[in-house]
């Protein structure tokens, strides 16, 4: 009877030992795969972040140039408005041609305003497009990494 119990214990220990070894091998395999995935993810993440920073810097430079151009246009606009005020004050005293010049200046003023608005909208569209593109790339990269992990 004691021998039967001892055999049962030995048999049970052997089965448990085999199961534990199998689980340890699986663990080592998964640990290696996860480490490789983490390494690849970190590398790809740093590359994407560097690319994002480059794009942000490029957009900052373009935005600064557009802001400078906007300031120049505002200066020109103020000068044209002052010129318009002078023309208004002399309109009644000077030739009727002055009225025509004022009308042309008004049209130019509206054109400058519209041009600036279009430039601003285009820049906002570019920024939104770039941000959307990098967000999609980040999601795709995340999905690829998840897919690799599950394989």
Image (cartoon, rainbow, N blue to C red):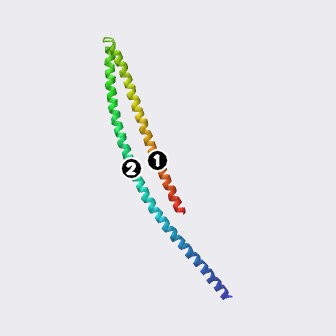
Tag 1–tag 2 contact (CB < 8 Å): no
19 displayed left or right of 72: right
**Residue 81: x, y in percent?**
34, 23
Dot 2 surroundings within 10 Å: few (below 14), some, or many (20 or more)?
Answer: few
**Residue 36: x, y in percent?**
46, 65
Give the foreground label among 1 and 2.
Answer: 1
Work out which quarter of the rendered image holds the C terminus and state it. bottom right
Q: What element carries label 1?
A: helix
- The residue under the point 31% across, 21% down is 83
Say above or below: 125 vs 135. above
Say above or below: 115 vs 33. above
| Nearer to the camera, 24 or 40 | 40
User: How many marks on residues?
Assistant: 2
Work out which quarter of the rendered image holds the N terminus and state it. bottom right
- The residue under the point 33% across, 26% down is 78
Say above or below: 16 vs 72. below
Instruction: Residue 53: give its label.
Output: 2
Q: What element carries label 2?
A: helix
| Nearer to the camera, 31 or 130 | 130
Disc 1 designates what residue?
133
- The residue under the point 56% across, 72% down is 23
Quarter of the image for residue 107 reads top left
Dot 1 surroundings within 10 Å: few (below 14), some, or many (20 or more)?
Answer: few
**Residue 118: x, y in percent?**
42, 33
Quarter of the image for residue 109 reads top left
Quarter of the image for residue 150 reads bottom right
Earlier-in-chain disc, 1 versus 2: 2
| Farthest-out residue, right | 1
**Residue 52: x, y in percent?**
41, 50
| Nearer to the camera, 149 or 111 | 111
Instruction: Residue 6: give its label.
Output: none
Mark-to-mark CA distance, 1 and 2? 14 Å
């Amino acid at each position: 009877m004691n021998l039967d119990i001892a055999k049962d214990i030995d048999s049970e220990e052997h089965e448990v030992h085999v199961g534990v070894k199998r689980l340890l091998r699986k663990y080592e395999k998964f640990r290696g795969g996860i480490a490789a995935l983490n390494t690849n993810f970190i590398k790809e993440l740093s590359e994407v972040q560097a690319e994002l920073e480059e794009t942000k810097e490029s957009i900052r430079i373009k935005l600064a140039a557009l802001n400078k151009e906007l300031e120049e246009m505002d200066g020109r606009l103020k000068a044209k408005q002052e010129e318009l005020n002078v023309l208004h004050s002399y309109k009644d005293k000077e030739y009727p041609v002055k009225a025509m010049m004022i009308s042309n200046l008004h049209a130019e003023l509206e054109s400058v305003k519209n041009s600036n608005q279009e430039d601003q909208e285009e820049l906002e569209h570019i920024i939104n497009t770039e941000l959307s593109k990098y967000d999609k790339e980040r999601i795709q990269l995340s999905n690829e990494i998840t897919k690799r992990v599950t394989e």
